[in-house]
Image: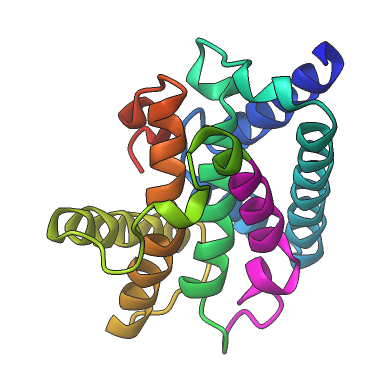
Amino acid sequence: IYTAYSKQKVAAESLFYQAGLRADAARIIGQHLAAGGHVSNLAAEVGRIRDGLAAIRSDYANYPLLHYFVSSRPEQSLTRLLFVAQDLALLLDTAVDPDECIGVAELGTRSGLIHAAAAVQDGVAETLIRGGPDRVETGDPSPGDQVRWRARFDSARAVLRESGVPVREDAAAAEEYVRRRGEWEPVLRESARRLGEDWAEVIGRA
């Protein structure tokens, strides 16, 4: 159990360092593609994150007690890891210009990253939330969430532009980001609450 928990913390801190010491998935994309970085490097890293999540999913299935191991450091948090991984997949699918960056656009879905993160999140929610993730209301986000998530999307696009990554500028991109974030964040937020984690610390500035 301790070995599995240690691997989880390492995976979470790895994303923390790549994301500029915060929960900023856009910086992971930007760092891999800045200065002419090759798309294959980003694809390989996304695959590594996906495989790490698959291993975590297996560990949580084998050792249910892992659900109750909660680090006091946000950068080691499983909910932080899941948030950054899902936001990374979502930004790859919605923020990157598919015409200018064919190899990156929709990589979050094509790589299976979004599905791996969702599998871990749902497994955690099934243990922590009576009735599982289906008991958490998702779909139409609150007006406050919509404002925050659009601001997050704009901030992510700014980070990508600074790194030289072509981004989608159409309003539909932001709307898709908001809609899809509303499908998973409420469940993750409720899981964090039940673990006694501060959601603001989990997501940082995101």
Question: Does the stretch in magenta take in 103?
Answer: yes
Residue 93 falls in which quadrant of the image? bottom right
Image point (51%, 44%), residue name: 83
- Residue lying at the far front of the rendered structure: 131
Visible residue check, residue 173: yes
The magenta-colored residue range is: 100-123
Question: Does residue 191 sit above or below 184 in this rendering?
Answer: above
Front-most of residues 190 and 163: 190
Kindly give the residue lying farthest to the bottom in the view shown: 99
Quadrant the N terminus occupies: top right
> What percent of the width, then of the height, locates residue 156?
39, 56
**Residue drawn at (28%, 82%) of the image:** 171
Q: Is residue 74 left or right of residue 150?
A: right
The quadrant of the rendering that contains the C terminus is top left
- Where does the image place residue 170, in percent across and percent down from the top left? 32, 84
Is 56 placed above or below 100 here?
above
Tell whether 155 sits left or right of 142. right
In the picture, measured across the screen, residue 11 lies left or right of residue 51, that is left
- Seen at 33% across and 84% down, the residue is 172
Q: How is the image coloured?
A: rainbow
Q: Position of residue 181 (x, y in %)?
A: 41, 61
The percent coordinates of residue 90 (x first, y second) are 52, 64
Q: Is residue 36 visible?
A: no
Say whether residue 4 is left or right of residue 138. Answer: right
Magenta part, dominant SS? helix
* Residue in the image at 35% along x and 23% along y: 198
